[in-house]
Amino acid sequence: MKKLKVDLKNNFLELVPETLDDLWYLERILEKGDLVSGSSERKIKGEEGRKAEKIVIWVEVQAEKIEFHESFMKLRVSGPMKSMKPEEFFEANAFHSIEFGLKDKIRIKKKKIKEFQLEIIDKAVKSSVRSSLLLVVLDDEEAIIAEASEKGIKTKTTIKSGKQGKRFKEEKQKENKFFEELLKKIQAEKKEKVLIAGPGFTKNDFKKFLENKKVNFNPVFENTNSIGKTGLNELLKTGLIEKVLKESRLIEENKKMDELMKEARKENSLVEYGLNEIEKAVEKGAVQELIVSDKKFFEEREKIQELMEKAESFQGKVFLFSSEHEAGEYLNGFGGIIALLRFRN
């Protein structure tokens, strides 16, 4: 994310998304009632006898609906128009949608910029200077390719080797074809960082294969006991990903959940579960850290956002977890919200 302007006095933000993750972050920053402006297109009725035509406009809408369409790499903000240029075509409060893609400047005017929203922006800015990491877990039968980004681990594709039996020459030909297809898929992802792991000798054979190919990326090779999604989770749990993708949100959230679960197992635990209990603790200023999954955030946005603001007013820290990896999924198992208390009554 490129941060062009943050004006806390006038509650104004000017940002440029540079990656798909940035659009995901923006969806969490935006809220109903925000004044959002940017470049767009609008169909203008033609004069009598002439067809309607689309023109490029600058428009400001009051956000009513915010949608992140990952497959189209677009963030859509819809609501009534509050201003527009050229002014001669402006229809006050007419409904309009602005679509923001990568490199599109977005201007946001809020009633108040919250602390957790600033933290989300800072995370997005920091993550933009790091490439996401491509993960490859393989053995002699299959390879799974996944992406480790700020959002979590996302499986991209699975490739089967087709190996069977013990016939050496035929199996070697299949292995070379398998490696060629795997290399093609890796290069298509255009990632600077690639972590290749797996049990047995296949990854070592693939390492030699890559050395002969003189590829334009620098792979890191590690051992795992498993393949598939189990192998991917093993990379995450053993900290191997952390060696390659330092300071990522993915690692931070898993560490935070581990810390909370250790505290929860103590006899006089300061971990609180359940929305009603957490609401009471927030009202008393007892919440030191409030951890919410993005799933819970969107299910009850107004209520949860009010809770976040209240916690921050008592100098509590607020964390928003992605539901797309293990820590977020685990958090959703506890209702999507957990708090670490300063004290209990």
Image: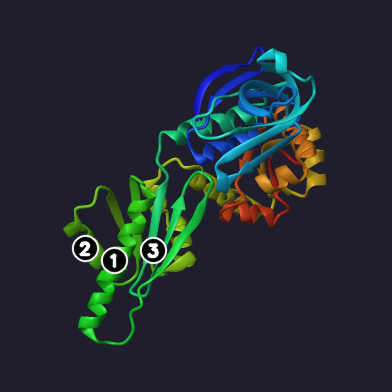
Estimate the spatial distance between the alpha carbons at disc 2 and disc 1, rounded to whole Å. 8 Å
Determine which quarter of the picture holds residue 332: bottom right
Q: Dot 2: few (<14), some (14–19), or many (≥20) neighbours within 10 Å?
A: some
Query: Residue 262's x, y, as percent?
Result: 59, 53
The tally of labels here is 3
**Residue identified by numbered label 3:** 137
Residue type highlighted by circle 3: Val
Does the rendering let one see residue 222?
A: no
Nearer to us in this view, 270 or 154: 154
Query: In what element is the residue under mark 2?
Result: helix
Residue 27: percent from left, percent from top: 64, 37
Would you name the residue on which mark 1 appears? 179
Sequence-wise, the earlier of marks 2 and 1 is 1
Q: CA distance from mark 3 to mark 2?
A: 16 Å
Q: Residue at x 77, y 33 (%)?
A: 306
Height in image: 181 above or below 322?
below
- Measured along the vertical axis of the image, is residue 191 above or below residue 312? below
Image position of 188 (left or right of 311): left
Q: Dot 1 lies on which element?
A: helix
208 or 275, nearer to the observer: 208
Mark 3 or 2 closer to N-term?
Answer: 3
Residue that carries the numbered disc 2 in the rendered image: 209
Rendering quarter of residue 221: bottom left
As drawn, the residue found furthest toward the front would be: 49
Q: Quick one: 94 or 17, which is closer to the camera?
A: 94
Q: Are marks 2 and 1 in contact (CB under 8 Å)?
A: yes
| Residue 323 visible to an observer of this rendering | yes
Left or right: 54, with 132 as reference point: right
Amino acid residing under circle 2: Phe
Q: Quadrant of the C terminus?
A: top right
